[in-house]
């Protein structure tokens, strides 16, 4: 009587792994692949008895280590990254309509500046914390999904409450619909709106941290560039849709969603985020974290432990990721004034010829209203340019990581001994010829039919195939790092061109060109970091499986993994630290902009205000520093970078 084969739950170990025919207890002809071992045979082969019996747990199954990394199709990557497009619609609504809405509530510009600090401050603190918590999450249906769902619910609730802040205060205070909006009514509304804006930014950063880690965890390392290219495309779509919705007179077309522009925008953004997150959560299966060994860090908690973990993680960042974070820090000193003040810059160029002494306040406001629409239209063109670049550039850039067939055994601590009895051997056992993401191949126990099917599915593209045709579009030598470097130089050139720009049309063309840089900013750093994380994560899981296969004591007496495995952080905390490198410079850029405005800003009814132009040029100087670091950075995958 033969034992049953291992459970099909093997595949819960990783969505990137396809178990070869070890999950079956018979071949295509009906003969058993693995026979029951007689208790009297080879009494010294305890390891074989431990790993070749049908009752071994999934985490100790040879089939896990002897498996082939799947190449994910475009539909999978679309479903994986769809949620970040919905999130970008929420971001675009907040950035494009948040300030006008808050000012309409009677909020002062000084308080408005405090409110806008919520984004970078919560990004600096929240994303590393959410990253650490999600890394330690042990919910059976995934590490990231609980935080994606929780963050989405918080975003929808806080944004809807923000849109209806005046109505909430009026109902709670028992005021009538015609009550004058002044005094305590106005003060309470402003306080509520301020609190809700901070809650909204907290929720948005939660779902963003979870989605970014979700993408890293569920795409193979050799497809991280492709996955992040799709993420940038989804972000581009979200940007375009967000600006289009902001440009339309929504209450005219969607009056059933609300009676103001902001209310309708919030409802549309909430529907977009909820639906896209739901699709990604239902369509993509995460690894079951309960099958991973517990960590000593799982029990750590408290604010002190959190900051200690953050500082330790900063110190042990891989060199490649550390370089990307440095680049992002200086580059985002340049991005912050552009993203927040470019409409003001274009608007100033439009109103300058019309501003004359004696204009009434209403006439000035009408001029600035039209100027804001012109600036918003320039941002729409910028978003379209960015989206087009997101579509085209991935076909022109040479992939950093390729799926190469590699056969090597030096990474084994000691060789795996095949079953000693002939009747226990599979019909054939051979070395897999396909190992994706640069990982080394492992010994596979597979039937000839199954192995040939995997080779047929995962082999290199045939001549004349679509993939082969797209490969011919690649520009030799144009790596992702070099494309990112060129985009930074383009950004600096555009910001310095503001010295010569004197018309809104020229400023709009400059803004459209910056869209190319924005597309690389959405793609390159995340792709470089994600590939490094995914590659290290695959190596870490492989070592854990090998220790189990070889009978090494992988777990200590307390049931935790050894200390050397604690040295590598997972996707959540690393991406959280990367977001610190994005958020922290925004605080610095805010302070720099405040000093420039204090020195150079003029009243709205006076022409010749050049303050915003100088904030853009200072950002261009900071971006030159990031370009220098990018130029000095080694190409990912170079042998000199391998530790």
Image (tube, rainbow, N blue to C red):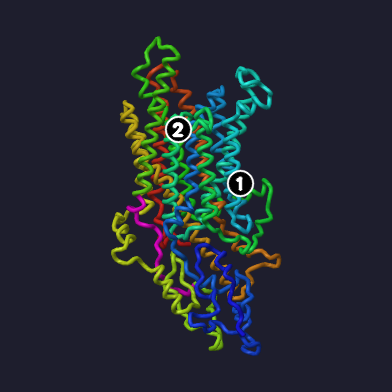
The verdict on residue 403 being magenta is yes
- Quadrant of the drawing holding the N terminus: bottom right
| Residue at numbered disc 1 | 150
430 relative to 196 in the view: left or right: left
Q: Position of residue 384 (x, y in %)?
A: 37, 40
Q: Is residue 564 above or below residue 357?
A: below
**Residue 410 picture location, percent across and down:** 48, 74
Q: CA distance from mark 2 to mark 1?
A: 27 Å
The answer to which image quadrant residue 135 occupies is bottom right
Q: Main secondary structure of the magenta part?
A: loop
Specify the segment rendered in magenta.
Answer: 393-410
Q: Dot 2 surroundings within 10 Å: few (below 14), some, or many (20 or more)?
A: many
Residue in the foreground of this view, choosing between 509 and 463 = 463
Residue 488 in view (yes/no): no
Disc 2 is placed on an element classified as helix
Q: Are marks 2 and 1 in contact (CB under 8 Å)?
A: no
Can you say whether 166 is above or below 451 in the image?
Answer: above
Please, which residue is most extreme toward the bottom here? 40
Residue extending farthest front: 256
Give percent across and percent down for residue 433. 42, 73
N-term-proximal mark, 2 vs 1: 1
């Amino acid at each position: 009587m033969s034992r049953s084969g291992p459970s099909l739950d093997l595949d819960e170990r990783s969505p990137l792994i396809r178990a070869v025919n070890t999950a079956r207890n018979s071949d295509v002809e009906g003969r058993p692949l693995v026979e029951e071992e007689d208790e009297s045979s080879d009494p010294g082969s305890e390891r074989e008895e431990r790993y070749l019996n049908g009752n071994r747990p999934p985490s100790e199954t040879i089939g896990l280590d002897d498996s082939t990394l799947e190449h994910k199709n475009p539909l999978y990557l679309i479903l994986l990254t769809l949620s970040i497009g919905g999130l970008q619609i929420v971001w675009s609504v907040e950035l494009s309509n948040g300030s006008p809405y808050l000012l309409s509530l009677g909020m002062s510009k000084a308080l408005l500046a405090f409110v806008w600090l919520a984004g970078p401050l919560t990004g600096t603190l929240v994303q590393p914390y959410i990253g650490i918590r999600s890394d330690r999450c042990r919910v059976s249906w995934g590490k990231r999904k609980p935080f994606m769902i929780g963050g989405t619910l918080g975003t929808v609730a806080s944004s809807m409450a923000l849109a209806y802040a005046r109505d909430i205060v009026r109902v709670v205070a028992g005021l009538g619909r015609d009550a004058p909006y002044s005094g305590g009514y106005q003060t309470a509304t402003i306080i509520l709106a301020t609190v809700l804006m901070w809650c909204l930014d907290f929720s948005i950063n939660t779902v963003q941290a979870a989605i970014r880690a979700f993408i890293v965890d569920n795409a193979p390392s050799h497809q991280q560039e492709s996955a992040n290219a799709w993420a940038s495309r989804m972000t581009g779509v979200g940007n375009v849709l967000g600006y289009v919705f902001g440009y339309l007179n929504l209450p005219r077309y969607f009056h059933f969603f609300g009676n103001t522009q902001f209310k309708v925008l919030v409802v549309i953004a909430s529907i977009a985020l909820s639906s896209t997150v739901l699709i990604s959560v239902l369509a993509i299966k995460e690894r079951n974290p309960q099958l991973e060994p517990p960590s000593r860090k799982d029990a750590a908690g408290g604010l002190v432990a959190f900051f200690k973990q953050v500082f330790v993680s900063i110190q042990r960042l891989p060199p490649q990721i550390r370089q990307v974070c440095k680049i992002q820090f200086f580059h985002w000193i340049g991005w912050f004034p552009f993203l927040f003040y470019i409409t003001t810059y274009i608007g100033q160029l439009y109103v300058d010829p019309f501003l004359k002494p004696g204009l009434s306040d209403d006439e000035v406001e009408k001029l600035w209203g039209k100027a804001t629409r012109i600036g918003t239209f320039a941002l729409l063109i910028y978003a379209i340019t960015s989206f087009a670049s997101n579509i085209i550039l991935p076909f022109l850039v040479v992939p950093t990581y390729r799926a190469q067939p590699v056969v090597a055994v030096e990474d084994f601590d000691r060789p795996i001994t095949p079953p000693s009895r002939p009747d226990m051997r599979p019909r054939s056992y051979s070395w897999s010829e396909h190992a994706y993401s640069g990982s080394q191949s492992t010994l596979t126990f597979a039937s000839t039919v199954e192995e040939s099917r995997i080779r047929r599915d995962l082999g290199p593209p045939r001549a004349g195939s679509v993939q082969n045709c797209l490969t011919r579009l690649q520009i030799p030598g144009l790596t992702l790092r070099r494309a990112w470097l060129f985009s930074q130089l383009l950004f600096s050139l555009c910001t310095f061109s503001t010295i010569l720009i004197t018309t809104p049309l020229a400023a709009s063309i400059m803004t459209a060109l910056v869209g190319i840089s924005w597309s690389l900013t959405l793609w390159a750093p995340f792709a470089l970091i994600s590939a490094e994380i995914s590659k290290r994560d695959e190596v870490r899981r492989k070592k854990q499986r090998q220790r189990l296969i070889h009978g090494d004591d992988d777990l200590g007496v307390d049931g935790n993994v050894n200390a050397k495995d604690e040295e590598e952080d997972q996707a959540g905390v690393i991406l959280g630290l990367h977001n610190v490198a994005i958020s922290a410079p925004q605080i610095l850029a805010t302070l720099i902009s405040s000093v420039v405005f204090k020195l150079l800003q003029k009243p709205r009814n006076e022409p010749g205000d050049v303050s915003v132009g100088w904030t853009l040029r200072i950002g261009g100087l900071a971006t030159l520093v990031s370009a220098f670091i990018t130029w000095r950075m080694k190409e990912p995958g170079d042998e000199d970078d391998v530790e």
